Image: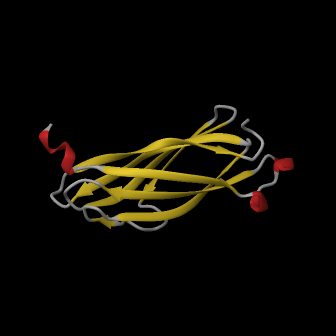
Amino acid sequence: MPDADKYRIEVHPMPQFLPEQSDPDNHRYVFAYTITVTNTGSVPAQLVSRHWIITDGNNEVQEVRGLGVVGQQPLLRPGESYRYTSGSALTTAIGTMKGSYQMVAEDGTQFEAEIPEFVLAAPGVLH
């Protein structure tokens, strides 16, 4: 597929545990994550929706779908990045998130940008 390089989006997640919002005694662990989305392709593309797969430490899976991210549907020109911070609450001290962004290029081509799996872990859970 010769056009594959035209439609390239890199996604870099950075999770962090939020102890001040968490309540381990009541099985509530809150995490923030900052995502940087970079258009490494050669055509402008808009992030139109998201699909998250969130798995907790008990292998309970929650799927979240919705328009945009944090109320935005950013248009990224080649070389541009968009960064946002959001959050998730788990009932376990560890879990993972992964998913995809649905993108639409300026020429009308629809494609997906993979969100690589990342770990949500309260301090002291991983050795």
Which of the image's four quarters has the N terminus? top left
Point out the residue furthest to the right here. 25
Task: Identify which residue, 82 or 60, lies in the foreground.
Answer: 82
For the point 30% across and 66% down, the residue is: 75
Residue 85: image location, x then y, percent: 54, 63
**Residue 30: which quarter of the image?**
bottom right
**Residue 37: which quarter of the image?**
bottom left
Point out the residue furthest to the left here. 2
Report the side of 44 relative to 91 (left or right).
Answer: left
Which of the image's four quarters has the C terminus? top right
**Residue 58: which quarter of the image?**
top right
Report the side of 41 relative to 92 (left or right).
Answer: left
Point out the residue furthest to the top here. 59
Residue 113: image location, x then y, percent: 35, 47
For the point 75% across and 39% down, the residue is: 125
For the point 77% across and 56% down, the residue is: 22
Residue 51: image location, x then y, percent: 44, 47
Report the side of 113 relative to 19 (left or right).
Answer: left
Residue 26: image location, x then y, percent: 83, 49
Q: Is residue 85 above or below residue 109?
A: below
